[in-house]
Image: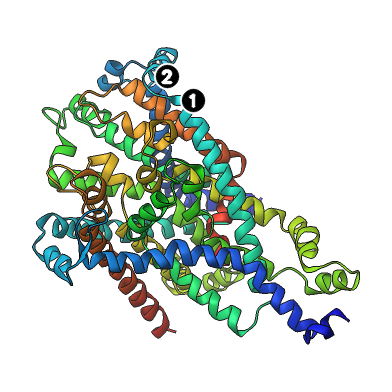
Amino acid sequence: MNTKKKGMTLIEKQRMSGWFFLAPASIMIAVMSFYPMIRAFILSLQTGTGVNMKFTGFSNYQRILADKVFIQSIGNTFFYLIIQVPIMLVLAILLAQLLNNQHLRFKGLFRTCVFLPCATSLVSYAIIFRSLFAQDGLVNSVLVNLHILPQAYNFLGNALSARIVIIIALIWRWTGYNMVFYLSGLQNIEYSVYEAAKIDGANGWKTFWGITVPLLRPTIIMTFIMSINGTLQLFDESVNLTKGGPANASITMSHYIYNTCFVNVPNFGYASAMSFIVFIMVAILAFINLKVGDTRD
Amino acid sequence: MTEKKNVSMIQRRLIPTYIFLVIVSIISVFPLYWMISAATNTSTDVSRGKIVPGGYFMQNFKNLVSQQPLWKAMGNSFFYAILTTVVCLLVCSIAGYGFEIYHDKWKDKLFSTLLLAMMVPQVATMIPLFQMVSKAKLLNTSVGFILPMVSTPFMIMMFRQNARAFPIDIIEAARIDGLNEVQIFFQMFFPTMRSTYAAAAVITFMNAWNAYLWPKVIMTDNKSLTMPMLIANLITGYVTDYGMLMCGVLFCSIPTMVVFFVLQKQFAEGITGAVK
């Protein structure tokens, strides 16, 4: 009836109405993610402030090469990435494997405890760890009272220890989060597979590498990508736990870019150039990960 | 008899596992326990290493309220987070439904394109978004807060995955009954997908409550500040009042903790929701 007048079949009409369902979300993503990304690239080719922006080609990118703080922030971010992500993911898989044991008691309680750190906001846990590791914080008073340290150590005032505190905090916050992925992945593995392996004489270690890891591979790759993505964008911890200090020794890329925009003399062009570098890193690493995941199939 | 023996043997073999899990659990819980106990002690007691709860909570609380707009920030955070959750669930669920139920070649292509947005770092869009929001005179507003958060590839994907389990027969039957496409969504899909909505709501609420970088960029006015911003302000001085600080951190954590304990299952589902 109506449909024939418009020259559309019922199916075509339904397909059309589908577009209305997905239009709001798609337009929002285009306007709030893709368009700003293009704008960021255009901005990165400009220098100046406010409305007096001028195109200066790739001068901002040249400046990056000579910016010791930004290079330091890249180094710091990769330091966190290389040390924290593997430790955290291995710990998460191990915990998931242990908690997936049929015979284990108090499973729910353990799982809740390990998962609990995820309930704290990023700023909260950064401040809690800042306070715990402060010079007059709990860690120092325990270590001094036990005579392990002669006097309070300035964990956050020393470049290496400040970075390590950030890594400890990150592991604390995100291990349970990743464990949840592995647990739900493990639950998809039939228990009979493990029983069969046991009958074949495989020990725990062998079943772990022979069954758990291969079957969880898609999940492992995904958590790996997510962790890399998250670590490359670290902000809250750097700002609130160490304030980037001492002397930018623990500052992350996002934190430095934020400072360049809103704390120091605003330089949107230069900050955009740096943020575009972050984007390229995230894209490259995700791409490598997906490729590695594909070829082993 | 033998079975009993078997059970106790299995449990005995699990002892190292128990020890390990207990240690990990203590490490996981302790910082949060310490936060609560520190909120009830004086700053000096906290730095002296006191870890049992004290009776100083009300004083810490009074200090906090007198120095910081605590209620204002709590109200703002609740308002922004709930608004984000409602709008995000609506926008993303209709999109996930649309992508799955009406899928064809072009919609699938659009979907893969949208997934690329997952790779766009927040810090890269921050500057242009700040310029856009300030040009639109939306700085310090809830609309400015929610704009970049209401449509995420993750949520669309989650609803799409779950819409896959929705029987197409129901839709066909509803069409024969004369319901239009919008009615089918709200009367058929929406009520049956309650658990998906719950999981999505938990995760969106948590993310919005915890958001820090974006509000820090656009909330320039003290009246619009959020809880994470408020507690971050407490550590700007040289001397830190730990009791008061942890009291603030406690307030910032209570809503997410309550959500966690009440809706833990939905939270776990929400995290892993899009990757089934």
Write down the residue under mark 2. B65
At horizontal 71% and vertical 69% (from top left) the residue drawn is B165
Write down the residue under mark 1. B71
At horizontal 40% and vertical 22% (from top left) the residue drawn is B39
Mark 2 Cα shell of 10 Å, populated few (<14), some (14-19), many (≥20): some
Q: Are marks 1 and 2 in contact (CB under 8 Å)?
A: yes
Question: Badge 2 sits on which subunit?
Answer: B
Judged from this view, the residue extending furthest toward the front is A52
As displayed, is residue A125 above or below residue A267? above
Looking at this view, is A17 or B45 the one in front? A17
What amino acid does circle 1 point to?
Trp
User: Residue A264, how many percent across, how many down?
Assistant: 19, 45
All told, the count of numbered labels is 2
What amino acid does circle 2 point to?
Val
Question: Is disc 1 placed on a helix, strand or loop?
Answer: helix
Looking at this view, is A132 or A91 the one in front? A132
Q: Find residue A137 and report its image quarter.
A: top left
Q: Would residue A128 be found to the left or right of residue A13 on screen?
A: left
User: Residue B1, how many percent across, how many down?
Assistant: 66, 50
* Residue B181 in sight from this viewpoint: yes
Question: Is disc 2 placed on a helix, strand or loop?
Answer: helix
As displayed, is residue A133 above or below residue A38? above
User: Residue A69, how many percent across, how many down?
Assistant: 13, 54
